[in-house]
Image (cartoon, rainbow, N blue to C red):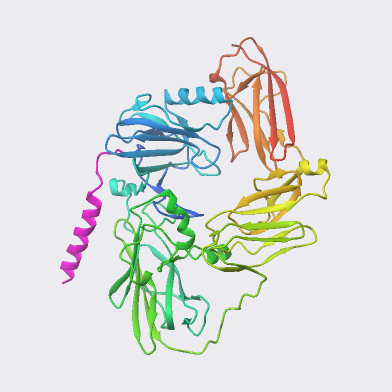
Amino acid sequence: MKKLILLLFIVIFNKAYAQYPKGYFRSPLNIPIKLAGTFGELRSNHFHAGIDIKTKRTEGFNVYAAADGYVSRIKVSLWGYGKVIYITHPNGYTTVYAHLKKFGKGIEEYVKNIQYQKESYETGNIFPKKDEIPVKKGQIIGLSGSTGGYVAPHLHFEIRDSKTEHIINPMLFGFLPKDTINPSIFKLIAYPVGTTSRVNSSTERALLPLREIKNGVYRTNTVEAFGAIGFGINTTDQLNDAPNKNGIYSLEMHVNGKRVYYQDFETFSFAESKYINLHIDYEYYAKYRSRVRKTFRNKKDKLSIYEDLINNGVLDVQPDMNYSVTIKASDFKGNTAKVIIPVKGVKSNVIFSKAIDSTNYKIEHEKFHKFSQKGVSIAFPKNTFYKDVYLDFKVDEKGLASIHQPTIPLDRRYTLTFDATDYSDKEKKSLYIANLNNEKHPRYVRTVKKENKFYTTTKTLGNYQLLHDTVSPKIYRPNFKNGQWINHKDFLKIKIRDDESGINDYKAFIDGEWILMEYNLKRKELFYDFSDKKLVGNKHIFKIVVSDNVGNTNTYSATFYRKP
């Protein structure tokens, strides 16, 4: 019987795996595949859309086209994917190569021409014509890097369906790192799902102690419960030759031997990725920074990763009944970890109950709501929230607006407005809305100023306040001295920073002509490649103008000498 079950699993797995071509795509790097991140990993507000291939903590490895095709999209941005190339292939797939340090020969010149035309480092989306930039399998299309925010050196690689733009797990195409290690399970939580449900005589979530009874197998004490309950699990995987924690491939739950919940990361779309905040215990993550994925589905959750759910994974526990619950986490190679949970149906009086909400601000999620207090208003469109909730909302004497806590996921943005009537015109220029959820580091949020009303739209609850920024950005540490000959330098470098509202824009010039300075966010450094343009004469004037998000500016200029 066991052999039959194993054979059936192999047939089903191979059937799913066989629909994707193996061997068609080559590796984008000529080094062994070791992953810093796997497909579908839990990230902030989204699932990881590709695999992150380690590059030995350095930049500059050749990145190769995975197959014949043409460059269908290019983008350069300070955040997100940084420098990224999309290649569309004749077999119906598109490969994506992100966080590049530099583009390959021909592509680099193509992009720089656009940057100089726009006089901007960031390009927005560029869509070359189908026959404009053809590439061959194994052609160098760039160098690996760490562009796109505060990221370590690595190559982010994706495979997408060219028509639907759905992302597909690259491991299904044969990109398989060495993996003989079982996933690990760190936390298990039981949830009373219904209003009359109980877990260990409580209406609150219960963190269940785990003990490992053998390698990859865990067990809990007997859970006494009643009514509709669910479970959540914190689990990660680890690959060979890599100490970092990665995401699992699949998760399933059985009750008395019958599967009631299953999800895997074969494919998903970007549009559904936001539902990660319903897939995990969002409140628990907001409080403890630990992601617990639930093995029961919220009815508002539109993720396509689930299969054949029974009662959405919710267990209906009846008095005097016993249940054997098993939750199994698997990686792509089939290594597993599982936890066994004995459940006993006990109808008990509540010993520990959740406090009843009694705030003045009730949200019926299918209605529009607007609340105002001391010159601050919050407006929630219909279906901003996934369910009806009670909100705390208060504004203190210093103008700090506390909009509940950032523990509730939102489906849509709401509008936060501050009345700036009492400020002078001069003061208004320096004001901006800041998110103060991190008290040590206020964060600028996009502020729209309309006469006496300053507003922003956001999907994050928490603390906000109008702050002043009257300090100009800093421009410092150029890699040359005023009046210096710099024939020996390949790059002109200078640092910029703004510790209040943040850098909004910078423009640099040599002899009055705009130059392309790339911005390394981690080092707060701008650099110009002298090979971009041939300078005329020996004496040159460098000038840079930097502005922050409220319009404070700073200018630096210096003279340098360089032979043509």
| Label tally | 0
Q: Give x and y (percent) for residue 471.
A: 77, 40
Query: As rendered, which of 397 and 144 lies closer to the eye?
Result: 397
Which residue is at 78% across, 49% downward?
420
Q: Give x and y (percent) for residue 262.
A: 33, 65
Residue 100 within the magenta-colored segment of the rendering: no
Query: As rendered, which of 405 and 236 lies closer to the eye?
Result: 405
Which residue is at 52% across, 82% downward?
202
Relative to 311, residue 558 above or below: above
Q: Residue furthest top?
A: 537
Q: Is residue 212 left or right of residue 10?
A: right
State the image quarter where residue 122 is shown. top right
Q: Give x and y (percent) for residue 17.
A: 25, 52
Which residue is at 63% across, 15% downward?
562
Q: Is residue 549 left or right of residue 200?
A: right
Q: Give x and y (percent) for residue 362.
A: 62, 69
Q: Is residue 442 visible?
A: no
Relative to 461, residue 555 above or below: above
Query: As rendered, which of 304 and 341 lies closer to the eye?
Result: 304
Query: As rendered, which of 183 and 348 lies closer to the eye?
Result: 348
Q: Is residue 55 left or right of residue 536?
A: left
Which portion, as a residue range, is magenta? Answer: 1-26
Which residue is at 69% across, 51% downward?
434
Which image quarter holds the C terminus? top right
Residue 16 within the magenta-colored segment of the rendering: yes
Which image quarter holds the N terminus? bottom left
Q: Residue furthest front?
A: 367
> Principal SS element in the magenta part?
helix
Q: Is residue 413 visible?
A: yes
State the image quarter where residue 150 is shown. top right
